[in-house]
Image (tube, rainbow, N blue to C red):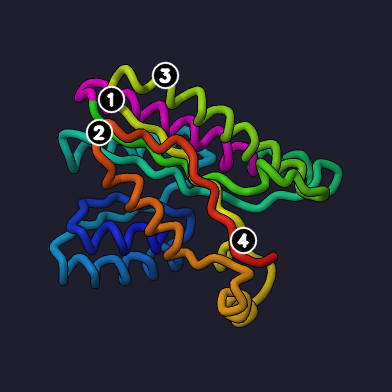
């Protein structure tokens, strides 16, 4: 999320980002504002939890106060989840609310606004887990597999309104979601066994800069080596 916001800010985009934690949000805002001061972009940040319906509504209410339209909405909130027998009910429900329901809520709010202008682009960040379906992560796989189907159907629904829908499914990416240390992540990146967050950001930018006639519905990004 931070990498995408930084890159888009370098092209002068006006951004609204949100996160659950003040410290991490402030850290991201610092980087993005630095880019904005150089390239003319704008950024607003707020504390919100995508798993909570009320928080999602607050985010879009804030967007309405900032702009008369929404051109792009990027869904990039996710938390890791294990197998169904390895998680308490409240924990896997929260994971599903974040990784799936929250995505759908944001899509509904964004699409309803884009529909009025008959223009827009929705980008959902998924995961290779929808394809690999590894053992020990059935809850996470459920969310990402559902997101895959949702995005494909949504793309067909939204085309009549000139709204594009793109699903990007990365492989292993060096982020805080990884269980290994940042140092080991950097080593894996050098060994071509892990993607960088910037790789996903560049992919997002590529999708957003295609002509209206081009609808990129799905991109799978994988590290070169396992």
Residue annotated with mark 3:
157
Looking at marks 2 and 1 on the same chain, the residue that comes earlier in the sequence is marked by 1
Quadrant in the rendering for residue 165: top left
Residue 46 image offset from top left, x and y in percent = 35, 52
Quarter of the figure with the N terminus: bottom left
Q: Residue 162 carries which label?
A: 1
The answer to whether residue 116 is above or below residue 39 is above
Residue annotated with mark 2:
212
Looking at marks 3 and 4 on the same chain, the residue that comes earlier in the sequence is marked by 3
Answer yes or no: do the residues labelled 2 and 1 have beta carbons within 8 Å? yes
Q: For the residues marked 2 and 1, what is the alpha-carbon distance in whole angstroms? A: 8 Å
The secondary structure that most of the magenta stretch takes on is: helix
Looking at marks 2 and 3 on the same chain, the residue that comes earlier in the sequence is marked by 3
Confirm whether the magenta stretch covers residue 39. Answer: no
What element does badge 3 sit on?
helix
Task: Give me the residue at 57% from left, 79% from top.
Answer: 190
- In the image, the segment drawn in magenta is 95-118
């Amino acid at each position: 999320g931070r990498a995408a916001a930084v890159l888009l800010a370098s092209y002068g985009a006006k951004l609204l980002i949100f996160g659950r934690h003040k410290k991490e949000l402030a850290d991201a805002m610092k980087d993005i504002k630095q880019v904005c001061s150089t390239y003319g972009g704008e950024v607003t940040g707020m504390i919100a939890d995508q798993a909570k319906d009320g928080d999602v509504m607050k985010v879009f209410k804030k967007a309405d106060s900032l702009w008369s339209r929404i051109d792009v909405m990027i869904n990039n909130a996710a938390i890791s989840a294990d197998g169904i027998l390895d998680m308490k009910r409240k924990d896997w429900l929260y994971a599903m609310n974040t990784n799936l329901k929250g995505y759908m809520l944001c899509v509904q709010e964004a699409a309803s606004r884009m529909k009025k202008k008959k223009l827009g682009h929705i980008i959902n960040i998924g995961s290779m887990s929808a394809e690999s379906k590894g053992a020990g992560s059935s809850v996470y796989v459920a969310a990402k597999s559902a997101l895959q189907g949702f995005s494909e159907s949504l793309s067909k629904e939204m085309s009549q309104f000139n709204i594009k829908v793109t699903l990007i499914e990365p492989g292993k990416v060096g982020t805080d979601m990884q269980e290994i240390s940042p140092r080991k992540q950097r080593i894996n990146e050098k060994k071509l066994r892990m993607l960088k967050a910037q790789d996903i950001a560049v992919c997002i930018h590529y999708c957003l800069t295609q002509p209206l006639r081009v609808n990129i519905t799905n991109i799978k990004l994988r590290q070169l080596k396992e």
